[in-house]
Amino acid sequence: MADVPSMEALEALLRRLPGIGPRSAQRICYDLLVRKRNLLPQLAAALERAHAAVRFCERCNNLSEAPLCSICRGEQRDHSVLCIVESPADLRAIEATGVFSGDFFVLMGHLSPLDGVGPEALHLDRLSQRLAETGLQEVIFATNPTLEGEATAQFLAELVPAGITISRIAHGVPVGGELEYVDRGTLGRAMHGRRLLDE
């Protein structure tokens, strides 16, 4: 709509979000501007608050409003086991299964040379600090079962100090799938059935 540039700008921003194409962006704009106008100020305020308050946990790289996230502050966690995931959504999916009580590290992505994503984008300095902590006995790679996820796990396994067990979640998760969309039962079985990375 050439005569409504502010709506076009909003649609363009919405299209940059995952899973929202041109038609979905247009429908969301119409819905917000016609039927749910009262949500616009609340949505804008919530986005501003999140932008100002949310940061990365200093220990695991998860999203948090405090220096340490609630998982890293948890006294009942098994700090001898570290699960490495690609995103906060993956962490949340594994936490929802209720079968894992160890620590996490969030990479915020995976290796993808074609997209220009190299090792420097995966917060390796913070991960190296976590891997160097005393008492760590096992590292579980729970990266997505995609080519990029597998390559990322193989690359990061080289960083794990000798003497620490390295495992990979079982492939009950469909190949090419993403953890945040897998049902709890399948993801729980995948965590229980993890295997050693060199098998």
Image (cartoon, helix red, strand yellow):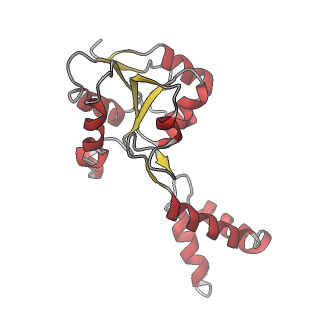
Q: Is residue 178 visible?
A: no
Quadrant where the N terminus lies? bottom right
Give the residue at x 36% y 41%.
107
Q: In this view, does 94 lie to the left or right of 43?
A: left
In the image, residue 199 above or below residue 3? above
**What residue is at 31 percent from the left and 34 percent from the top?**
130
Q: Quadrant of residue 141?
A: top left
Placement of 68 over or under 169, stated as above or below: below
Badge count: 0
Q: Position of residue 73 (x, y in %)?
A: 49, 37
Quadrant position of the C terminus in the picture: top left
165 sits left or right of 30 in the view:
left
Question: Horizontal and vertical percent for residue 5?
Answer: 57, 83
- The answer to which of 85 and 10 lies nearer the viewer is 85
The quadrant holding residue 33 is bottom right
Residue 54 in the image, given as x and y percentages of width and height: 50, 56
Residue at x 49%, y 26% (from the top left corner): 77
Rendering coords of residue 49 (x, y %) = 57, 64
Residue at left offset 79%, top offset 70%: 35
Is residue 84 in sight in this rendering?
yes
